[in-house]
Amino acid sequence: MRYKHSLGSRLFDVFNYGLMLLLIVITVYPLLHVISISLSHADFIALGEVSFFPKGFNMKGYQIIFEKPLLYTSYTNTIMYATVGTLLTLLLTSLMAYPLTVSKFRIKKPITIFLAVTMFFSGGMIPTYLLMKELHLLNTFWVMVLPGCISAYNVIIFRTFFQNIPSELRESAYMDGANDLTVLFRIYLPLSKALLATFALFTIVGHWNEWFSALIYLQDEKRYPLQMFLRSIIFTQQGYGSSEKATELIQNRQINPKNIQMAAIVITMAPILCIYPFVQKHFVKGVMVGSIKG
Amino acid sequence: MRNQTAAATGKLQVKQPGSQRHNKFIQSFWSQKFLYLMVLPGFLIVLVFAYFPMYGVLIAFKDYNVAKGIWGSEWVGFKYFHEFINNPMAMRTVKNTLILGIYSLVFGFPAPIVLALLLNEIRVLAFKKFVQTVSYFPHFISTVIIVGMLKEFTSLDGMFNTIAGWFGKEPVNFITEPQYFRTLFVGSGIWQGIGWGTILYLAALSNADPTLYDVASIDGANRWQKMKHISLPAIMPTTIILFILSVGGILGTDFMKVMLMYNPGTYETADVIGTYVYRIGLEGGRFEYSAAVGLMLSVVSFLFVLATNRLSRKFSETSLW
């Protein structure tokens, strides 16, 4: 349907497109700025002359970061937490959601209530910390992976998704002698690939960005995830973590502490930034799946 | 009733001999053994990591003694709650939490709605897609990075001060000044969330019947009128549900972000209940007192959700449950 555009309507379009362009600039500029600073010469940074593009090429910030052993351990740790955490999340959530779609499952209702309660009440930070201590989970691998791996919210989303799979498929599999585990792994999960992919992405990003539970539950630097490494660079007195070489370079004005900080940010953000354009539509799908109330 | 449905849907039940009740129970349990087995690991994890801490909240009413355990420790009643209420430093955190929550709601809630309505008016679909893709990205940036960037932008030689310099203002280290904390917190929150927040509204808008717009055009409605009478009603249910959730979450400040942003110099406006619980409890080791503070926060938050849901059900058709 075509209709004439009045002058007001056109003016609005101009204004609207301008606003959207402004939004893009406001969103993209900080990211560009971070990259530019990480690559710029110390003097230009000190003068505040760096904006969209690097001024005077300088890789020393990256050098300092790449010389820190903690970068490698924390990168590896984050990848491990993300991998194991995501696999556990998908596996346990599917296992828990499937029985809730079987209408004659005897404890379906109690389990649903058992889960729903956790959406409104929680013990809070302190009792949870004391529990971890009691269970000797402090400073272990599992404290980063187990507690968050199942949430009522996710189970409900999975259940809603599974409910859209015709139950005749299940019934006929029973006829062929399949049990429920087989039905889940051979029929339900292969039909839910989109759901699994979306959730895997969200969980991976969640682990990638996690730092607070590490702050509370981990004392050993060797177990720190990437974000804790980044935090130790940005949020310390000197502003670049401890490094004699950095101190020396800064005194010689060869490098600005911001070089190091921004390089650390770039290194942390790079993987997400690189995969984002290819997977962003899955993220959007994930929100839509989640918004369908069960 | 149950037997009827069982007989109608399940072939396994059909084979059951119609003997005693408890025999039947065992049989049905056995026939569903895989289902029980599948629920078990998730059940245990939720039990341990979600329910045990709820029991652990009891220490808020106890003089906690590690050797005696939670249950064995002395009861002290509402001692810690009184202490909190009578502590002016602590009450400051309540005030800050509320103000921060209200600012976030007032400025942060409408922002995605406005953006969604504006995006909906863009007719070049490729451009619309592009704006969406770009604006969603900040949602995936970690809090540590967000605050790191914020520190850079607000530093003495950062961009904010450069701009302020154009207007002849002296450079300020914004992040260490208490009067700027709320603006920075809410502003960076909007920067991060405005795009992502539009998704549900855009979905609701795309569900609006396109013929409505056509009919309205024929009747001579202009774009503003169409937005007001077609687009806005289309997103109303979504808006109400998200509003309930936001009001319910008003006390659920992202205290982890606050923790990265604040310092003793900005506690005056920045210290919220969550950061207070962390400092007093985990850094200071006063577990009982801080557990009591945390408990109060979650009880009041829950009441907020209940109240807003009730209000919404009263005044509109939409509610969470």
Image (cartoon, helix red, strand yellow):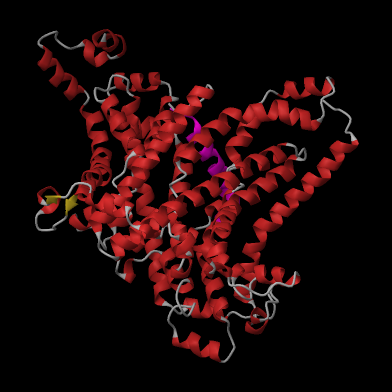
Query: Measuring 27% from the left and 23% from the top, which residue is drawn there?
Result: A105
Query: Where does residue B211 sit, x and y in percent of width and height?
Result: 74, 21
Q: Is residue A171 left or right of residue A33?
A: left
Q: Is residue A106 above or below residue A220?
A: above
Q: Is residue A271 above or below residue A200?
A: below
Of B229 and B144, which appears nearest the observer? B229
Of B313 and B141, which appears nearest the observer? B313
Q: Is residue A110 above or below residue B102?
A: above
Q: Is residue B180 left or right of residue A229?
A: right
Of A32 and A78, which appears nearest the observer? A32
Query: Measuring 88% from the left and 33% from the top, which residue is drawn there?
Result: A5
Query: Where does residue A92 sit, x and y in percent of width and height?
Result: 32, 41
Q: Is residue A116 magenta?
A: no
Look at the magenta stretch and give its main secondary structure.
helix
Q: Is residue B263 left or right of residue B7?
A: right
Using the rendered image of the protein, determine whether residue B261 is visible from the camera's viewpoint: yes
The quadrant in which the N terminus of chain A is found is top right
Tell me which segment is drawn in magenta.
Answer: A274-294
Q: Is residue B31 above or below residue B255?
A: above
Query: Where does residue B244 sit, x and y in percent of width and height?
Result: 49, 35
